[in-house]
Image: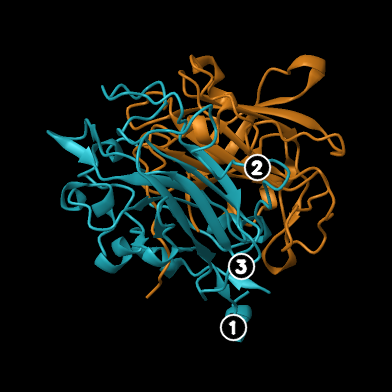
Amino acid sequence: MSEITPSQTVGPFFAYGLTPKGRCEWDPNGQYSWKETVSDNLVTPDASGQRIHIEGCVTDGDGKPINDAMIEIWQADAQGRYASPRDSRALPNAAFKGFGRSTTDKNGIYSFDTIRPGSVPGPHGKPQAPHIVVCIYSRGMLRQVYTRLYFADEAANASDPILAIVPADRRGTLIAGKGKDGPNGTPAYRFDIRVQGDNETVFFDI
Amino acid sequence: MSLVYPKESLSVFPKHLTPGYRSTAKRSPSKPLIVMPHTLSELTGPFYGHDVIQENDNDLTRQHKSEPLGERIIVHGQVLDEDKRPVPDVLVEIWQANACGRYVHIVDQHPAPLDPNFTGAGRTMTDRNGYYKFITVKPGAYPWGNHHNAWRPNHIHFSVFGHSFLSRLVTQMYFPGDYLFPFDPIFNSVTDEKARARMVATFDLENTIPEWALCFRWDIVLRGREATPLDNDEH
């Protein structure tokens, strides 16, 4: 029997602690004003590769926007290396950490500015298509859910070992479509997360 | 060190759909989760926070001009893995209601006073022994709209990082002997009694500081244990 500490919901009131900047428009008394630990902008001066913008809406089982969710992403750099001791190819002094946190706004929209990740090693030495691990927390979620974001304009998706596990009719929920390019021609991707219901996003049991 | 993250360990977690907690009805996946192997993407994780933490970030009583009202307390403990080894150098973040049971969050409209000297957010890094410490005030209980006369037991929200993204834990620390436990669907969403007890801090008389602050000890056990040769064969 495991003895890990159980998960509990992040609740509705995390913003002033975990995502203060993302809620600064709510800041009547300067209470949300401390420096945030984790930002929704992952781009660092040392990060090579294609800058991208990711945006999406988080909705509940009625299709209503979830306006109090927290989204965390974890990704490799453009060379497919994770800034983690477990990845022996990691660059220990890299400023690019590959970790970001965003909160949804009143319309359920979250967003990140980051670098398009490279392909990373997968099971049995097979490469995985470029992807981002996405974790969702909110009131009404007693534990986080994990999903993955893949890129629609990526040929390697066809041979990705994890996408291959997902039933074909649900695979599309993991694919971020190309959105309207941002300033300076930064490519934008749209990745909506449907927590429940029709076309529910695939969540992984990991 | 090569850690593995057996899924069986998650059996103590609440179910996504827990009807007693009404908000889970529309915010829980209705389709089965897809089982997948742990790849490098899951086995790695953020190593974060070192350059952000400032002095007094872990002392919630010293973030404003004066001290907050309420019962001053120390909350400390160790972050451990499933083998009970310390998890050093990881980010621990907390947020909580003030002594009256009111959050500064603008959505919280509970008619209890805000305290101009208390925000209720803190953060720290564990030291090389996995040890963390916060100084704060005991949060008050507060009502919520889940059901008639619903009140949350006193609790502090915790967000903890571990050796991988799979160890990531968001949870709540409760206080010993709370009379609201039997009535709280969030606390009771953990159905195993022993697992529930692991969310409850212990009163720590030994580390109480006389004439100054009571102390509570709370150890946090994250996913991850040493791989055995058998585990390695599976990959």
What is the number of the mark on residue B129? 3
Q: Of B235 and A19, which appears nearest the observer?
A: A19
* Inter-mark Cα distance, 1 to 3: 24 Å
The chain coloured orange in the image: A
In the rendered structure, which disc, 1 or 3, sits on the residue that comes first in sequence? 3
> Label 2: which residue?
B55
SS for callout 1? loop
Asked if residue B31 shows in the view, the reply is no
SS for callout 3? loop
In the rendered image of the structure, the colour used to display chain B is: cyan
SS for callout 2? loop
* Inter-mark Cα distance, 1 to 2: 40 Å
Residue A134, quarter of picture: top right
Residue ID at (75%, 52%): A83
Q: For the residues labelled 1 and 3, say whether their Cβ atoms are less than 8 Å apart.
A: no
Question: Which of labels 3 and 2 is toward the front?
Answer: 2
What is the number of the mark on residue B148? none
Mark 2 neighbour class, 10 Å CA radius: few under 14, some 14 to 19, many 20 or more: few
Q: Residue B164: percent from the left, percent from the top?
A: 61, 59
Residue ID at (69%, 46%): A75
